[in-house]
Amino acid sequence: MRLISMCQSSRSGLRPYSPADVCRSDEEKSLFVTDIPLFLNKTQIRQAFFRYGDIVKCKLTTRNHYYNAHVQFSNASSITQFEDIWAIICLGNSLRVCPASYLKAQHDIHREHVAILAGIPKNIKEADLTEIALQANAKAVNIPLSYNSYKPKPYAYLNFASFESLEAAKELTIAFRNKGLTWHSPDEAKNLCHVCG
């Protein structure tokens, strides 16, 4: 009887339960989210992603002085749109996003072409720089928070899809609230003044 049952299951196309398949299916429906300020909570993060699809799970973990999040949707089709979206805004703050199914090389592409824009006034959030990001054709913008004071630093990291996009952006003259901003490479961050940029 057991042999017959197994044969019938095979003929009907049923597959045995596989934890690996379940995990892979969950990954295909999930996002990995980074650079989440610690003053945001799970409810606020869920609300920010709700317009992209029905959310079934949102798990936060602490890394350094930020949260990371694993956001799972009910359908894998919700993830497709994030192949072109590298960040979303949550209450004025930019959260970096990447499909959880991406390999390390795909993750690395999101941080491969980066420039710093310095001279940003105090207490500015990424949402205030949306027009600049569009003008520069940046895929994501992030203002780092001070480890000690947790206040925004006076410069922002801009991520680009290609080296060509990065170089084209650096040719632009950028101003914010009538104040000129300056371009720098990421390795110059340690030399930028944390007060005036």
Image (spheres, rainbow, N blue to C red):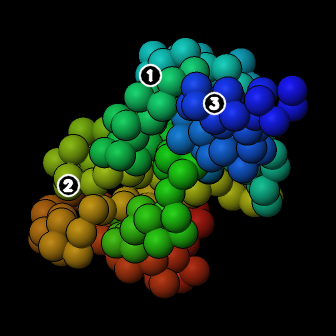
> Closer to the camera, 98 or 18?
18
Q: Earlier in the sequence, mark 3 or mark 1?
A: 3
Rendering coords of residue 36 (x, y %) = 65, 43
* Label annotation for residue 124: none
Identify the residue at horizontal 30%, vertical 62% (top origin). 160
Q: Quadrant of the N terminus?
A: top right
> Closer to the camera, 13 or 89?
13
Q: Could you tell me the amino acid type at mark 3?
A: Leu
Q: Could you tell me the amino acid type at mark 2?
A: Ala
Q: Nearer the viewer, mark 1 or mark 2?
A: 1
The answer for how far apart the CA atoms under marks 1 and 2 are is 25 Å
Q: Secondary structure at mark 2?
A: helix
| Residue corresponding to mark 2 | 136
Contact (Cβ within 8 Å) of mark 3 with mark 1 = no
Rendering coords of residue 35 (x, y %) = 62, 50
User: Where on the picture, by quarter, is residue 128?
Assistant: top left
Extreme residue in the right direction: 2
The answer for how far apart the CA atoms under marks 3 and 1 are is 32 Å
| Residue corresponding to mark 3 | 14
Identify the residue at horizontal 44%, vertical 43% (top origin). 87
| Residue corresponding to mark 1 | 52
Identify the residue at horizontal 77%, vertical 29% (top origin). 4
- Residue density around tag 1, few if under 14, some if 14–19, many if 20 or more, within 10 Å: some
Q: Is residue 69 above or below residue 138?
A: above
